[in-house]
Image (cartoon, rainbow, N blue to C red):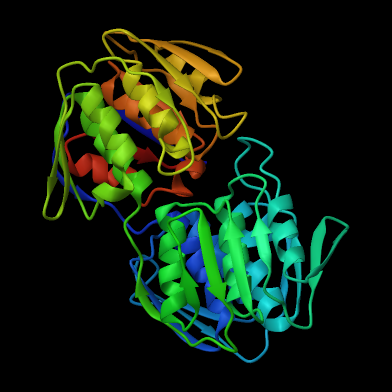
Amino acid sequence: MDSILITGNGPLKGTTHASGAKNAALPILASSLLAEGTHTFRNVPALADVSTMLKVLTTMGAKSERLSGKKSSICEIEVGKKVTPEAPYELVKTMRASVLVLGPLVARWGRARVSMPGGCAIGARPIDQHLKGLAKLGAEIELHEGYVEARAKRLKGGTVAFDLITVTGTENVMMAASLAKGRTIIENAAREPEVEELARVLNKMGARISGAGTDVITIDGVEGLKPVDHAIIADRIEAGTLLCAAAITGGDVLVQHAVPEHLEAVLHKLREIGCKVTVEHDGIRLVGPARVSPADIKTREHPGFPTDMQAQLMAVLATASGTSVITENIFENRFMHVAELRRLGADITAEGNTAVVRGQAKLSGAPVMATDLRASASLVLAGLKAEGKTLVGRVYHLDRGYERLEKKLKALGANIRRVKG
């Protein structure tokens, strides 16, 4: 099992880039099931989760190929006239986003059998909103032996009002509604850039979707869709993490391809804690202070502060010149990184959904263990600042969402390397 070894060695400086967005790539890859033919997707990140989604699709009978080798950012998916509309437990248990094949399967083939999802243990995150949404479109839903089974001769448009905002739920219903008969209206829809990106792809395939990026999305179903050639947007969370690496080390880093509009809440907080953030023609540049100032953070659905950046900002604030309060409003179990940050000398007290972070002038290297994807990133960031050596274990979590993060940080001057285990 691989680990990452970091020795704190001062400010990071230079230029790097944000790879394709994982949370956009996964639903977009799933959307290929909606149209027969060969789809070409560009800027696809080389991540464990992407590999899992491709395995799910090939298990169903689709063919996938990364052009010019496994590390290529270009991926072709060929979907034939027939598929096996089942996503097995062995794959779905490793990544909850596999449930995104549910909507496309029942929409195009009239049936789907998808294992209940797994993934990071950062909260219950049930898929009941997905199922309620598909049921509103006429799908018959049954839960049997750990699988969701859905059937419909043809889905019919309807109004889907989510009880709570769900990104993957919005995406699943949006894909299903693209081939439904009539008009579907999604109320209380997720507004994330990744939802907008999926709508952009579906419309290029021939769908009729409007309102993506707002809380009401309208889909007029069509009879069929065609394959697409599309370049995926940059990953805003990876971009935010790289900016935090500059902030915590007092560095000067330009992150190319980063989209400022996708990171407004994060950039606001980075400026608040004393970072100089400038938008340039090819990305975002951050110059960090010698020591950041404290700030309070409350996670919210987009366009609020993203829960996926909470752990990284906590690591930065652990080195601030005062006390910060972080309130996690999205997931009920997303402070598992607190105990590990404490091992590095952070002074953090967590109770319920609130963490009080008392900034320390120094952190000290130690062996730590990643508990989930974003927690692993926070530990790497803290290790960049800590004196001595930090060994981050279980970095398979990191590989689910970051494309060769240690190599990007090393190119910026970090003393960091992967240790094969």
Q: Can you tell which quarter of the image residue 278 is in? A: top left
Q: Nearer the viewer, residue 260 or 292?
A: 260
Left or right for 46, reference 261 = right
**In the rendered image, which quarter is residue 298 located in?**
top left
Which residue: 35% across, 16% down? 318
Return the residue nearer the eye: 249 or 233: 233
Give the camera-side residue of 122 and 306. 306
Q: How many badges with numbers are in the image?
A: 0
Residue at the (47%, 24%) spot, across then down: 368
Residue 34 percent location from the top left of the image: 58, 80
Residue 188 x %, y %: 57, 51
Residue 416 visible in image? no
In the rendered image, the vertical position of residue 97 relative to residue 104, given as above or below: above
- x and y percentages locating residue 143 in the rendered image: 85, 58
Q: Is residue 274 left or right of residue 341?
A: left
Residue 124 screen position, x and y as percent: 69, 38
Q: Is 107 rendered above or below residue 80?
A: above
Q: Is residue 175 above or below residue 412?
A: below
Q: Quadrant of residue 347?
A: top left
Q: Is residue 154 left or right of residue 13?
A: right
Q: Can residue 208 be seen here?
A: yes
Point 27% across, 32% down: residue: 268
Q: Nearer the viewer, residue 285 or 300?
A: 300
For image coordinates 57% across by 67% down, the residue present is 174
